[in-house]
Image: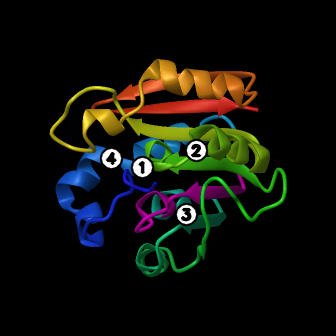
Amino acid sequence: MHEKRFNGETDRLRSPERVKLLDAERVVSLSVENINPKSVLDIGTGTGLFAEAFAKLVPDVTGIDVSDDMLEKAKLHVPGGKFEKAQAEELPFAEASFDVVFMGLVFHETDEQLKALQEARRTAKKRVAILEWAYEEGPQGPPLEHRLSDETISGYISKAGFKSFDKVKLNQLVLYRLER
């Protein structure tokens, strides 16, 4: 277990090349499009790159991660955010606690994707957004065997009980927007 989790230097997650590739502001804008959220949960927040972008648009930002080091970095970048240690498969929040639940490049790292998605759906009021690496070899991101195909992700979405979803292709990434 946990062999797919990022275990490199936290500073690499904020390298200029990676920040440019991830285009956090565009991803966040697409994640909240047409719903005017007041709260967001960033699952697998890492150094808080996406939480920081969400904080520019959403008043209440919460992030979770399994790494204490990551959480400390996130707190530095998003001083107004709330951060705690937790796993995607066992979210310590009540049902419908957040308008948006976001998983930025972490879904493929979870030990139990279906359970993680069910937990995201349980805690979301309006939308779950999943940003993942495209299922293709690329110069950035995890090896192909750690990535999830569109068919695999679509299967999890259906099994988790979402009524609809769309996807937006972004360079080497894909953003899935799931509606409750």
Give the structural element (helix, strand or loop) at label 3.
helix
Which residue was labeled with disc 3? 55
Residue 125 horizontal/vertical position (percent): 79, 45
Q: Which residue occupies 42% across, 73% down?
A: 70
**Mark 2 touches mark 1? (CB < 8 Å):** no
Disc 3 and disc 4: Cα gap in Å?
17 Å
Q: Which residue occupies 62% across, 64% down?
A: 61
Which residue was labeled with disc 1? 25
Which residue was labeled with disc 2? 112
* Identity of the residue furthest to the top in this view: 151
Give the structural element (helix, strand or loop) at label 1.
helix
Give the structural element (helix, strand or loop) at label 2.
loop
Could you say which is closer to the camera, residue 115 or residue 96?
Answer: 115
Q: Amino acid at mark 3?
A: Ala
Q: Dot 4, how many residues are within 10 Å of its Cα: few (below 14), some (14-19), or many (20+)? A: many
Q: Amino acid at mark 1?
A: Glu
Camera-nearest label, 2 or 4: 2
Can residue 36 be seen here? The reply is: no
* Magenta span: 36-51
Nearer-N-terminus badge (2/1)? 1
Disc 4 and disc 1: Cα gap in Å?
9 Å
Q: Which residue occupies 32% across, 47% down?
A: 22
Give the structural element (helix, strand or loop) at label 4.
helix
Residue 134 horizontal/vertical position (percent): 34, 29
Camera-nearest label, 2 or 1: 2
Q: Is residue 140 magenta?
A: no
